[in-house]
Image (cartoon, rainbow, N blue to C red):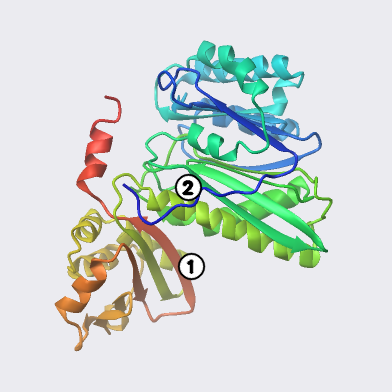
Amino acid sequence: MAVGEASTGFQVVPGVRLASVSCGIKGQDQLDLVLFEFQPGSTTAGVFTRSHFAAAPVLLSREHLSRRNSRYFLINSGNANAATGEAGKSDALACCQALSQQTGSLPEEVLPFSTGVIGEKLQVEHITNALPDLTNTLREDNWLLAARGIMTTDTRPKISSRQVEIEGKTVTLTGIAKGAGMIQPNMATMLAYAATDAIVSQENLQAMLVDSVNQSFNRITVDSDTSTNDSCMLTATGVSGVDCNAGAARQAFVVALNELVRELAHAIVRDGEGATKFVAVRVKGGRTDAECLEVAYAIANSPLIKTALFASDANWGRIVMAIGKANVELDASKIDVFLDDVCLMRAGGRDDDYTEEAGTTVMKNEEITITVNLNLGDAVETVWTSDLSHEYVTINAEYRT
């Protein structure tokens, strides 16, 4: 179950090769191990979860990224290697060391990533035994295969590409992501990997990624829960020869990057566990961005609103309830509320022209925008979310069975 159509088209990124195989963590013949290989000299930026229980591979990837340029990403699905203590970190390192021996690289040039069940020991031998097959099947056109290999409860792969003409040359960006539940990132998303053939320094790449994440992955929620394994990575191989560190080239590159990561973030919400609706919650007229976000998340994370969305029930009193519980100082007599173009509330009271039929018509749509005007200032923020269905409960009740 997912909202809207999803494209599986993509552009290869020169300087990047990928592979995906089954190593047995998720069961026989299910893709669960992915490898990225980057051309020497590539630069990599990363944003990671702020969870106090950050998984072992997150801790190790942070360390490795601070020491060396990355040559490889090694990603397993089906086991998060989180809440596993020092043993989990040793297991992640063992995988990096095995891959470094296989490829002739340094262990610090390998970044490990994991996603899946929390609290279980990583099956290191499953991974290391599959490395020969993994390295032997590296190809530049395996992006979609890799997108499938990092999936857990996702119903479909998430992939996006952008190409932009800069200085008479084509610069390519392609990214993949996974995530459907445990989604309200506090940095990035569940797992996301993007690459480009532009020339960008590590310092500039990091700044660009942080800005993009704050406009996209840090503006989505399915269930208000933040993963222990959230990681978002961006690598620049430089193969195109186009320097995007400054000026008009940087501006054009940033526009393409922002579009790419926003599309991936939206794809996660559209494939939210059990989702039948894709909902934008736009709050404007705040005094600060933080104020707008507080109200937007109060709406987007309300179980009562999310279940009403699933039922296509135009019970707009639930929206009022959520705004009222937001931890900000508001003037209720100034607030306007809309469902798409239908005004529900004007100046703190039911709009004179509102009808239940008009509200219900909007609520039956697969894609809905809830707009709240606080009429206090000029700040505007948007959060994207999904509804809450019976299927969400089923998926998470049966997650380990």
Residue 343 place in picture, x, y as percent: 27, 81
Q: Report helix, strand or loop for mark 1.
A: helix
Identify the residue at horizontal 72%, vertical 31% (top origin): 71
Residue found at the very far bottom of the displayed protein: 352
Few, some or many residues within 10 Å of mark 2 (<14, 14–19, 20+): many
Marks 1/2: CA–CA distance: 16 Å
Sequence-first tag of 1 and 2: 2
In the image, taking residue 239 as reference, residue 26 lies left or right, namely: left
Few, some or many residues within 10 Å of mark 1 (<14, 14–19, 20+): some
| Amino acid type, label 2 | Asn
**Quadrant housing the C terminus:** top left
Report the front residue among 275 and 94: 275
In the image, taking residue 275 as reference, residue 40 lies left or right, namely: right
Residue 11 place in picture, x, y as percent: 64, 49
In the image, taking residue 246 as reference, residue 116 lies left or right, namely: left
Instruction: Please give the residue where the numbered disc 1 appears in the rendered image.
Output: 289
Label 1 with label 2: CB-CB less than 8 Å: no
Residue 250 place in picture, x, y as percent: 75, 61
Above or below: residue 91 compared with residue 114: above
| Amino acid type, label 1 | Asp
Report the front residue among 278 and 122: 278
Residue 306 place in picture, x, y as percent: 25, 56
Above or below: residue 11 compared with residue 262: above
Is any atom of residue 374 visible in this view?
A: yes
Quadrant of the rendered structure where residue 3 is? bottom left
Identify the residue at horizontal 66%, vertical 28% (top origin): 138
Above or below: residue 391 compared with residue 146: below
Instruction: Please give the residue where the numbered disc 2 appears in the rendered image.
Output: 186
Is any atom of residue 188 visible in this view?
A: no
In the image, taking residue 329 as reference, residue 389 lies left or right, namely: left
Q: Report helix, strand or loop for mark 2.
A: loop
